[in-house]
């Protein structure tokens, strides 16, 4: 009898505490972390002239080796993900997808085994429509077969693109059908969608309740480039649409502003700090696209900054928002577990030197941390303990052009 009551109680508790309408596969309870080839390696299929950088099994094996041996995995970067251009140009005689036999001679299952042997997970890419964005066979008409193939291969994440569909109804149905097909396989496969991006592109506002119900993460906005203007427009799109997109995020489902491009060619150090800080405060998936075989020390330590990762991975799963925008300073705030907060101060000025900003804690809505007194720690661009403060404290500091200062505010406890 007692057992029965306990069961009913825990069932009720599950219903009450379950995040509203999250894809119920128990995955991505914090934002996904890992590596994806697209921004850095694009659709380079020329293994004859560029064997080191072409899309081949070698590339993922080498990234997996480094992710396992150079501290990435321990920090949470555990998905090694294939993007477009891995496919052969045709399905096999049983209509199953197959990898390009020249570039993936061992096949995807073997690659998955290898990645798993390193304690990592393997992600793959397909498209809801007739063809992928780069023109390889799409999944339309084959969702069940493809989901089953991915599960049999040991795939752990599917990035599902949205090129080459006939109309928006077909696109939406396709995303839902693939979600159901993945669930039916019984394998844990994180489902990363681009459904909202293509819906916005089609001139409609996506139904984020439905998106969250079927996907573990979803792209909203244009592809990221290795440039400050791309980072800026991605950040601004998120801030300008925050009333629509922020409520959709939470454990199990996340807004995805696309890959981290830190460690490539286009961002200054300050801009790299800004991407890391804003991606963390937005509870974004942290999916790097860079060459881990050849990454500078500054980028590596920024991507491996455990304090920033802790903000990104905070268990509460509340996505942060821009709370003010004035005098070319943007201020972002994210609520964290334990009555704590993260704050980012972004200096948008692109001329001159470091600019000074002064803020009063009381004006930043951090009362639940600082009612009695709180502890303020700067975690970017460098780690500095600022010590104990109260609500009326004035914080004064400088922020470099296009750079950010990130703070963590926690209740004081002795
Ligand atoms: C689209 C996606 C990108 C990438 C390419 C591959 O543009 O948004 O992230 O997957 O397709 O072709």
Image: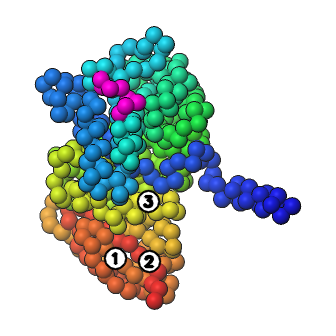
Q: Position of residue 241 (x, y in %)?
A: 46, 49
- Mark 1 is surrounded, within 10 Å at the Cα level, by few (under 14), some (14 to 19) or many (20 or more) other residues, namely many
- Ranked by sequence position, the earlier of labels 2 and 3 is 3
Report whether 275 appears left or right of 334: left
Q: Which residue is mark 3?
A: 313
Helix, strand or loop at label 2? It is: strand
The disc, 1 or 3, on the residue closer to the chain's N-terminal end is: 3
Kindly indicate the quadrant of the structure image that contains residue 412.
bottom left
Q: Nearer the viewer, residue 136 or 4?
A: 4
* Any part of residue 196 in sight: no
Q: Position of residue 293 (x, y in %)?
A: 19, 45
The residue at 23%/56% (across/down) is: 300
Marks 1 and 3, how far apart at CA: 18 Å
Q: Earlier in the sequence, mark 1 or mark 2?
A: 1
211 or 64, nearer to the observer: 64
Which is closer to the viewer, label 1 or label 3?
3
Q: To which residue does mark 2 refer?
A: 410
Residue in front for this viewpoint, 407 or 366: 407
User: Label 1: which residue?
Assistant: 377
Q: Are marks 1 and 2 in contact (CB under 8 Å)?
A: yes
183 up-or-down from 241: above or below: above
Which stretch did the figure color magenta?
104-111
């Amino acid at each position: 009898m007692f057992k029965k009551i306990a069961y009913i109680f825990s069932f009720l508790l599950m219903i009450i505490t379950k995040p509203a309408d999250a894809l119920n596969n128990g995955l991505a309870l914090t934002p996904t972390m890992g590596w994806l080839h697209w921004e850095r390696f694009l659709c380079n299929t020329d293994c004859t002239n560029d064997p080191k950088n072409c899309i081949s099994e070698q590339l993922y094996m080498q990234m997996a080796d480094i992710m396992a041996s150079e501290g990435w995995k321990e920090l949470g970067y555990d998905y090694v993900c294939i993007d477009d251009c891995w496919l052969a140009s045709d399905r096999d005689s049983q209509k199953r997808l197959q990898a390009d036999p020249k570039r993936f001679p061992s096949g995807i299952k073997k690659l998955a085994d290898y990645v798993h042997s390193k304690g990592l997970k393997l992600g793959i890419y397909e498209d809801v429509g007739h063809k992928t964005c780069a023109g390889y066979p799409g999944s339309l008409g084959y969702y069940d077969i493809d989901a089953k193939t991915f599960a049999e291969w040991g795939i752990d994440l599917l990035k599902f693109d949205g090129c080459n569909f006939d109309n928006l109804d077909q696109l939406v149905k396709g995303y839902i059908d693939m979600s159901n097909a993945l669930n039916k396989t019984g394998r844990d496969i994180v489902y990363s969608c681009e459904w909202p991006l293509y819906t916005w592109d089609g001139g409609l506002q996506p139904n984020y309740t439905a998106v969250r119900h079927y996907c573990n993460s979803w792209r909203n906005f244009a592809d990221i480039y290795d440039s400050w203007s791309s980072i800026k427009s991605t950040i601004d799109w998120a801030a300008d649409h925050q009333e629509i997109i922020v409520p959709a995020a939470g454990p199990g489902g996340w807004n995805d502003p696309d890959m981290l491009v830190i460690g490539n060619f286009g961002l200054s150090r300050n801009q790299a700090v800004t991407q890391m800080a804003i991606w963390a405060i937005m509870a974004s998936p942290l999916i790097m696209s860079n060459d881990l075989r050849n990454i500078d020390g500054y980028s590596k330590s920024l991507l491996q900054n455990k304090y920033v990762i802790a903000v990104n991975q905070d268990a509460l799963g509340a996505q942060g928002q821009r709370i003010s925008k004035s005098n070319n300073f943007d201020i972002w705030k994210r609520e964290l577990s334990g009555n704590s907060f993260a704050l980012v101060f972004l200096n948008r000025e692109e001329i001159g030197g470091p600019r000074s900003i002064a803020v009063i804690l009381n004006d930043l809505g951090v009362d639940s941390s600082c009612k009695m007194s709180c502890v303020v720690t700067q975690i970017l661009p460098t780690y500095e303990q600022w010590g104990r403060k109260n609500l009326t404290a004035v914080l004064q500091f400088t922020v470099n052009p296009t750079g950010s200062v990130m703070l963590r505010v926690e209740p004081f406890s002795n």
